[in-house]
Amino acid sequence: MNRYFFDLHNGDGPVRDEEGTRLPSREAVPREIARIVLDIARDELPVSDRTVISVRVRDETGRTISVASLIYNNEWLDRDQ
């Protein structure tokens, strides 16, 4: 199993993953990204009308292998209320 590091940026500034997560294969990375992003979204949304949650994934050598983002955007259509 390889270790992957999931660095987070969610508006509070960047958080570097120093421990990493062991996954059975590279193909498991997107599922882990989705789990992380959905957990954060469940806890933090909506904090404003626009929020971006980004995850940068590094392999054991420190090379970035994936970047994923979730964008929450709320647009009020009845501005006069």
Image (cartoon, grey):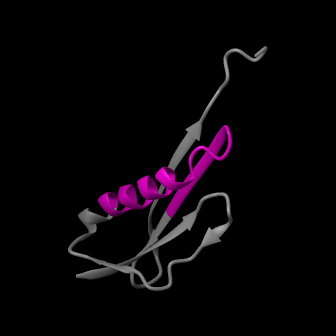
Which residue is depicted at the point 41% across and 81% down?
A: 20
- For residue 81, above or below residue 47: above
Residue 11, by quadrant, is: bottom right
Which residue is depicted at the point 37% across and 55% down?
A: 34
Q: Pick whichever, 81 or 19, lies toward us.
A: 81
- For residue 60, above or below residue 68: below
Which residue is depicted at the point 67% across and 37% down?
A: 49
Residue 27, by quadrant, is: bottom left
Q: Pick whichever, 71 or 58, lies toward us.
A: 71
- For residue 18, above or below residue 5: below
Quadrant holding the C terminus: top right
Image x and y of residue 24, in percent: 20, 74
Q: Pick whichever, 46 or 18, lies toward us.
A: 46
Quadrant holding the N terminus: bottom left
Is residue 53 toward the left or the right of residue 29 in the image?
Answer: right
Image x and y of residue 68, in percent: 47, 55
Which residue is depicted at the point 75% across and 17% down?
A: 79
Residue 29, by quadrant, is: bottom left
Instruction: Please give the range of residues in magenta.
Output: 30-55
Is residue 9 toward the left or the right of residue 19 in the image?
Answer: right
Is residue 64 toward the left or the right of residue 52 in the image?
Answer: left
Does the segment drawn in magenta span residue 52?
yes
Does the segment drawn in magenta span residue 19?
no
- Outermost residue toward the right? 80
Q: How many marks?
A: 0
Image x and y of residue 25, in percent: 22, 71
